[in-house]
Amino acid sequence: MPQTARLPIMRRSAPRLRLKKGFSLIELVMTIVVVAIAAIPLSLLVSRHIPSTFAMEDYARALNLARLDIEQVNNTVYAGIVPTSYPSGNYDISRAVSEVTSGTEARKQITVTVTRHGTATVLISLISRIAKNVTYSLL
């Protein structure tokens, strides 16, 4: 019997799995849920932090205004230190002056109080004492 050439039998190979090129809907939903669970505590933290930031900004501005007034008092002659009140932007500044005597030396106690304009809530209150015959200066 003559030999015939055998042709290789073409087998059908198992279909190749397609490569995934994206996310399924379930994976996307699960990612959104995980991100939401992580974002809730962070949003609560931020929402509590914002009011305290504004309060600290108020306090810092009030402190700077009070320091400025105390510096103005330090650069005023002793007899010119008098009680006063005046507005400064959104704040009201009031200066109370009282005589304090210890022994023979006369001194004045100056209390500078800063409040928000139109409220009675004290944001900051600074106290300083000035002696009659003392000169303040920088070398």
Image: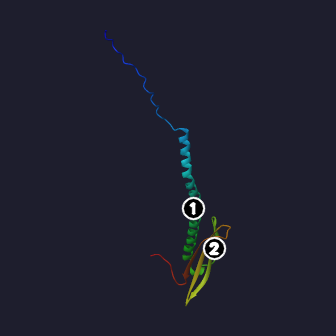
Amino acid identity at mark 1? Thr
Amino acid identity at mark 2? Ser
Q: Position of residue 56 (x, y in %)?
A: 57, 64
Nearer to us in this view, 42 or 13: 13
The answer to whether residue 18 is left or right of residue 98 is left
Residue at the image position 53 percent from the left and 38 percent from the top: 24
Of the image marks 1 and 2, the number of the one nearer the N terminus: 1
Q: Secondary structure at mark 2?
A: strand
Residue 48 vertical placement versus 20 (above, below): below
Nearer to us in this view, 53 or 3: 3
Residue lying at the far front in this picture: please name it: 1
Which residue is identified by label 2?
94
Nearer to us in this view, 114 or 106: 114
Q: Position of residue 94 (x, y in %)?
A: 63, 73
Residue at the image position 61 percent from the left and 82 percent from the top: 98
Q: Residues within 10 Å of mark 1 (few under 14, many from 20)?
A: few
Task: Tell which tag, 1 or 2, sits nearer the viewer.
Answer: 1
Residue lying at the far right in this picture: please name it: 118
Name the quadrant containing residue 109.
bottom right
Name the quadrant containing residue 117.
bottom right
Which residue is identified by label 1?
53
